[in-house]
Amino acid sequence: MSVEGVNEYYFDNYYRVVVLEDEGGFLVSVDVYITDWRLGEPVEKCINNTCLLVKEITLNNSQEYPCNPSKITIIGVKTSGKRETISVKWLCREKPGYNQIQALYELSWRIARGEQI
């Protein structure tokens, strides 16, 4: 992608990570796909039979995370009663380098599978 302040990375052939720089912070959006929702009860915003699922997770203060995130938000969808996890968003205080982006990608999959991080 060739937009200033936006960078794309691909892992495992086609899972995308997008890093956006905005107002001194960084949003790292990690594509994941799990045909399930294992993160407790989310906030649901619905239009007809399609719902957006949103869940913020609490950071473990005793653990260090790549990019010093201030917030982690998980996004999913629900259609016809089926829930799917589709992305993990990291609001970072520090600009992530490639190794941090790869670590965020791996952590995002752990989160989507319902594992503790």
Image (tube, helix red, strand yellow):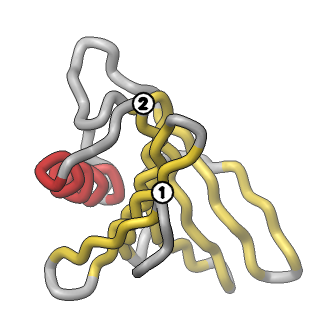
- From this view, report whether residue 63 is shown above or below residue 57: above
| Residue 101: percent from left, percent from top | 23, 53
* Displayed quadrant of residue 112: bottom left
Question: Is 43 left or right of 95, judged from the image as shown?
Answer: right
Q: Position of residue 109 (x, y in %)?
A: 26, 59
| Label 2 – label 1 distance at C-alpha | 12 Å
Q: What is the quadrant of the C terminus in the image?
A: top left
Quarter of the figure with the N terminus? bottom left
Please report the residue visible at 37 percent of the width from the left and 75 percent of the height from the top.
33
Between 3 and 31, the one nearer to me in the picture: 3
Q: Residue at x 52, y 46 (%)?
A: 73
Q: How many numbered callouts?
A: 2
In the foreground, 81 or 15: 15
**Label 1: which residue?**
20
In front here: 94 or 37? 94
Q: Secondary structure at mark 2?
A: loop
Q: Is residue 43 left or right of residue 16?
A: right
Which residue is denoted by mark 2 in the rendering?
93
Image position, residue 47 (x, y; %): 86, 76
What amino acid does circle 1 point to? Leu
Residue shown at 33% from the left, 28% from the top: 68
Question: 10 Å neighbourhood of mark 1: few (<14), some, or many (≥20)?
Answer: some
Quick one: SS at disc 1?
strand
The residue located at (33%, 75%) in the rendering is 16
Q: With respect to residue 97, does 25 lie above or below? A: above
Instruction: Tell which residue pokes out farthest to the right in this image.
Output: 48
Quick check: can you spot residue 17? yes
Q: Do we see residue 85 in this rendering?
A: no
